[in-house]
Amino acid sequence: MPSPSNLRTQFKQHLVLALPIMISQLRHMSVAVAANVMVGRLGAFPLAACALANSALWPFFGLGMGISYALTPLVAAADASKHYKKATNVLKHSLVINLVFAAFFSTALMLATPVLHCIGQTPTVSTLAAPYLRLLALSLIPFMLFQTFREYTEALSFTREAMYINIGCSLVNVLLNYVLIYGKLGFPAMGLLGAGWATRVSRILMALGMVSYVLGKAA
């Protein structure tokens, strides 16, 4: 049986690795809450449309995250065995799989937006939700790109980098929500579509940040 001192050491090591991952996961919830608060000030219909579009989108985001999680143990095992080429190959294969998934379901969601008018919602809510859902659907591609490289770095025990990128882009997301929803700093007030653009831009920045970090480490 491990001694208490060894258990404390292992607990600290696991906490150092896990805490940034936990913060990154909480970041998704906090940004969604902030967006809902800002959209809620526009009225009941935009808030309902936001909830409807997110309800249609999040099952695919959850599925995409689940698919990307397969990368982590494979890369970690390869790295522990010093099979670095295998770890790189796993990353390449996962990148193809994740981007094909993202492209397919982004296209499917965009083509399926007319279904929103057939599920018993009021016409106003469905009309507002459709273009917002199309913007969110396109953000699935940069999100899966970010998620692929995030899982790769976390498999190599670099968990803080994704957290920093997550937090930074979250702040950008909240700022863009404020600017684009209400029309600040010279931008037109876009309402619910402003929230969609803020989400899309922040996820592109997340992907660029994560890819740049991995490629920079590899150089």
Image (cartoon, helix red, strand yellow):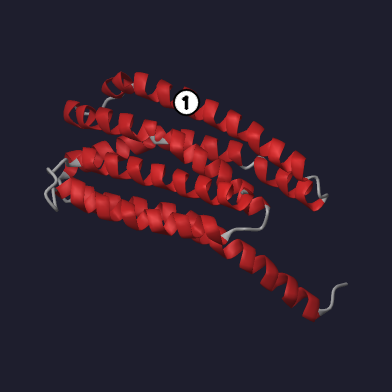
Residue 193 against residue 1 in the figure, above or below? above
Q: Residue at left 45%, top 55%?
A: 166
Specify whether 182 is left or right of 119.
left
Specify whether 78 is left or right of 18.
right
Q: Amino acid at mark 1?
A: Ala
Question: Residue 170: x percent and y percent?
Answer: 37, 55
Question: Residue 5: x percent and y percent?
Answer: 78, 81
Foreground pick, 164 / 134: 164
Residue 208: image quadrant is top left
Mark 1 lies on a secondary structure that is: helix
In the orientation shown, which residue stands out farthest toward the front?
219
Specify whether 47 is left or right of 141.
left
How many numbered discs sit on the rendered protein? 1
In the orientation shown, which residue stands out farthest toward the right?
1
Check disc 1: other Cα within 10 Å, few if <14, some if 14-19, many if 20+: some
Q: Residue at left 36%, top 47%?
A: 202
Question: Residue 65: x percent and y percent?
Answer: 54, 40
Q: Residue at left 54%, top 58%?
A: 161
Residue 134: image quadrant is top left
Foreground pick, 153 / 178: 153
Specify whether 192 is left or right of 208.
left
Q: Which residue is mark 1?
A: 103
Residue 45 against residue 25 in the figure, above or below? above
Q: Would residue 5 be visible to someone looking at this image?
A: yes
